[in-house]
Image (cartoon, grey):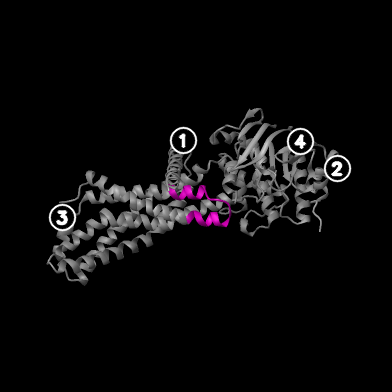
Amino acid sequence: MLRFLGRSVLSLLQYLGELAVLFGETCRALVTAPIRWRLFARQLVEVGFRSQLVVIVTGAFTGAVFAAQTFFQFHRIGMESAVGAVVAVSMFRELGPVLTGLMVAGRVGAAIAAEIGTMKVTEQIDALRALGVHPIDYLVVPRVMALMLSMPILVAECCGLGALAGYLIGTKVLGISEAYYLDTMLKFTGLRDIKMALSKGLAFAVLVVFISCHQGLNAKEGAVGVGRAPTEAVVIGSLAILVVNFFLSFALNIIYPAGV
Amino acid sequence: MIRVRKLHKTLGSQEVLRGIDLEIKKGETCVILGRSGCGKSVLLKHFVGLLQPTSGEVFVDGEDIARLPERELGRIRKKVGILFQSGALFDSMNVGENIAFPLREAGLRDPAVIEEKVAEALEMVDLAGEQEKMPENLSGGMRKRVGLARTIVSRPECILFDEPTTGLDPIASDSINHLIRRLQKRLSVTSVVVTHDMKTAYHTADRIAYLHEGRIYFLGSADQLRHSRDPVLQNFIEGRSGDSD
């Protein structure tokens, strides 16, 4: 039992160490190596532009259903007007960033790990190295830049659409007064909540892109290895988002305290 | 051009190379022979810094590259090109873009010059006019030729061939063998060919090294190998496993 525990802790530490090395190498490459703007633009379309639909749909339906459920509970104690504030604050501070992170981990993280993993086992990464091109400069840096720019925008879209869908369901379908809804929503939702959402988005972008690139770069030989890389990228990425979000919520609440 | 001294390499728990000493002279073609899994490709990858030895030294043009960091190996890799077993073409690029890749990475920007060099490289490997094809539409032999064109387009001083004829039919293999010889004459490069194909060895080699149990078991000319009475070499040359029905 003790041996199993020790081995698990050691492999976790080794994994975190490898991620830290990849992070350090990437930071160094961002400063010293030439930026490949064409690859960055291609990744921006792939990871940012093409993720919009899934993120918008997720945000809108979550906002709508959250507004409905909140209304059903609050209606019984006559607090329907608070629905707007609850939905907007929850979307910006928690649901928007986490759901966007999970969706991006599923869509983009899996694609990154699969693409880089396939390149690894078909010797394409060795070919890059043999041609004098560092794989981190060519494969990791453009993806890191693209996701770090895209993620806050995707989070903003998810939160915005969630709040809008909540407003539409609350006022047009459930019959809450528009004036009350907007008043409480604007009173309790401020710039601090938007900043918190964007900060979390940035943090989750870092988690998703480094975990996915690491899984791809360390893919094992054969179909099983390539198949495992995206699965593990999604699982580890999603779990990391949920765990880090918990600690981030407390830390960011100190910087951007909730409330009026 | 390339010299290795007391090279050891352990992969996992297996010691693949057990003290290799070998020198590749400038301008020669050295063939490294050996059974599948004996460590030929592992040895070859040390010559270009794709693998780091567990112990020992690897000199390229007098410089020990065994402990060089990845970013400093770039200038060594401009001198030494490698043709991978599968061709290792970038599957997101067409043939022309694959071959232009090393030129663009070296800072060449003029499309006319790039186009001209790509066409010349393709002509050298007998694939003139195939720029627009995607790698998935190429046969195994064509992939290796395109891989070779990508390697030679930046004119390295030394070319490493990793199993250039493996997986090809006899006619395609023969064509690749002729191509290797022709390129040596045309570009005057140093070549190292890793293979287990005796036809390739006899056709291309100035010298042959036979790798056995992690060491260089034999080093000499093709004639010396052919006339050797050593049972290990004879079994390999004649393809005898020693098993009976």
**Residue A32 shows which numbered tag?**
1
Q: Are marks 4 and 1 on the same chain?
A: no
Q: Are marks 4 and 3 on the same chain?
A: no
> Can residue B155 be seen here?
no
- Disc 2 packing (10 Å; few <14; some 14–19; many ≥20): few
**Residue A187 shows which numbered tag?**
3
The answer to which quarter of the image holds residue A169 is bottom left
Of residues B132 and B224, the one drawn nearer to the viewer in this rendering: B224
Provide the chain ID for the residue under circle 2. Answer: B
Q: Are marks 2 and 4 on the same chain?
A: yes
Check disc 2 and give the amino acid type: Arg
Q: Earlier in the sequence, mark 1 or mark 3?
A: 1
Q: Which residue is mark 4?
A: B28
Residue A215 left/right relative to A187: right
Distance, label 1 to label 2, CA atoms, is 53 Å
Q: Is residue B237 rendered magenta in the image?
A: no
Provide the chain ID for the residue under circle 4. Answer: B
Instruction: Please state which of the two labelled residues, at mark 2 or mark 3, is closer to the viewer.
Output: 2
Check disc 1 and give the amino acid type: Thr
